[in-house]
Amino acid sequence: MTRRLLYRLLAIVTMLGMTTQAIPQFGGLGGIGGLIKGVKNAKNLSESFRNISEPEEIKIGGDLAGIILGVAPLIQDSAKQRYVNRLGRWLALHSDRPDLPWKFGIIETDDVNAFSMPGGYVLITRGMFEGMRSESELAGVLSHEISHVVRRDHIAALQQSLRNSALTGFSDYVSGGGIVGSVVKTAIINAGKDIFTRGLNKSDEFDADRMGVVVAARSGFSPFGLVGVLQTLSAAPDAKGNALMNRTHPLPIERIDRLDRAMGTGMDALALADVKVPSFEQPKIPEAPQQTPVRKKVKRKT
Amino acid sequence: MRRSGKLSLAALLVFCAIRADAAEKGLIIRAGDLLAQPFIDATSAGKVTPAQPVTIVERRGAWVNVDASGKSGWVRLLNVRLEPAVAIIGPNKAAPNAKPTGMTSLLRTGSSGRTVTTGVKGMDEEDIRNATPNYVEVALLDTMAVDAADARANASRASLTERSVAYLDKKRGK
């Protein structure tokens, strides 16, 4: 009995000890004095997004990209990854933020979807990549995602999502510092998960469509590529692989209608013959020992 | 054509492949004219009505050539949505006669799309909720980035031509 009681007491003391130890590490959040100081100096997390710098945006983008890559990793095909990066970067050069460190990736899932993150991250699923009728369609999808980044749509959504958060310490997050930094990081990651599962504002999607077709057209692609993709999506409203995409975007038919109204016939002259996405099928090269005698024979003949 | 030389033959084959693939069924969105040619002021070859089923014969820029109740003509791409069931079946099943051979079969690889496959896990809300950020993959993604000069050189090889295009208003009108 007494020994058990002693253990209990010990456990309580240890817990108390841990708590009191933990408080000072929270710096500005700990103690009355620290709390007042913190309120005076530190901005609420949501406010911190108001005048966010480019490196801060990239930092957030990396954490949000990590979420999607945690679900579906990059496909192991360097030729295809290089292809989307060259194409994507070319498109981004025709946006209003050509100098961001743009990165593009194809991720391993049958699902049809594409994602972007602050600071220049764009991910497209293999399911979507393989469903493209043409390069113009792929350019349309990538340009739509680029437009979200250019317009800082995710930053606005994060700000909205965290508006009721009393968290401070954005600078600790950016510098990767300590417990405060990791608490803020968790909050940002959870808000990012909200965005990826609930979607951005409908109006952000329409705006990104409108900007995307222009970016594609400026880059030498048919602005009607995105329309083709939306048609494909409109044809499969109940496909399992489109479920998340459908839940996070306005109806494809609604997006086509909005684009129709904005594009009118003014972009008809910018349409181009559609070129298919390269197959990336490597022709089989015979092994070296087999090749040598063939070459000799050819030489003798000539 | 924005690509020339060696690629022209390939482009021609691709064009054929696109045509072979295009056994897609669609529905007209708004009432309008079925035009004899893919131009806004082309002569009318008939009328189309909302929800009228059409077969897409060819896609060309802003236009699609359709077979509408036996009549052939052009309507705007933005005036056609695809019919659900057919698109899920996929072009290979929809057009059994269009057997890909040789170069065409190569060019078709990986772009017929819209096939329902299983085996690789999908990506739903729960997956994202439960995800742990994968920073190894983020670092790998960082290494795949190309610089502006590389992108420009590649675009130049592909004969992509930059154009000056103004941003669109929400409602520009027709």
Image (spheres, coloured by chain):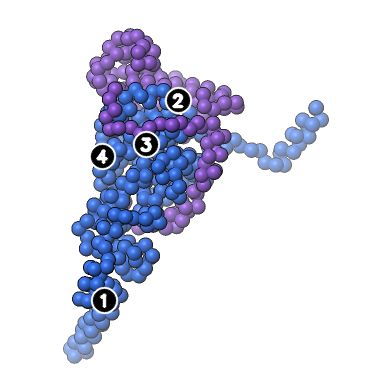
Q: Colour of chain A?
A: blue
Same chain, labels 3 and 4: yes
Same chain, labels 4 and 1: yes
Give the residue number, with chain letter if any, for mark 1: A23
Disc 4 versus disc 1: distance between alpha carbons?
43 Å
The amino acid type of the residue labelled 4 equals Ser
Disc 3 versus disc 1: distance between alpha carbons?
48 Å
Q: Position of residue A283 (x, y in %)?
A: 59, 35
Disc 3 versus disc 4: distance between alpha carbons?
14 Å
Give the residue number, with chain letter if any, for mark 2: A272
Marks 4, 1: nearer the viewer: 4
The amino acid type of the residue labelled 1 equals Ile
Give me the residue at 29% from left, 28% from top. B172
Disc 4 versus disc 2: distance between alpha carbons?
28 Å
Q: Is residue A124 above or below residue A3?
A: above
The image quadrant that residue A174 belongs to is bottom left
In this picture, residue B20 sits left or right of residue A35: right
Does label 3 or label 2 sit earlier along the sequence?
Answer: 3
The image quadrant that residue B164 belongs to is top left
The amino acid type of the residue labelled 2 equals Leu
If the image is split into quadrants, where does the N terminus of chain A sit? bottom left
Give the residue number, with chain letter if any, for mark 3: A212
Report the chain holding disc 4.
Answer: A
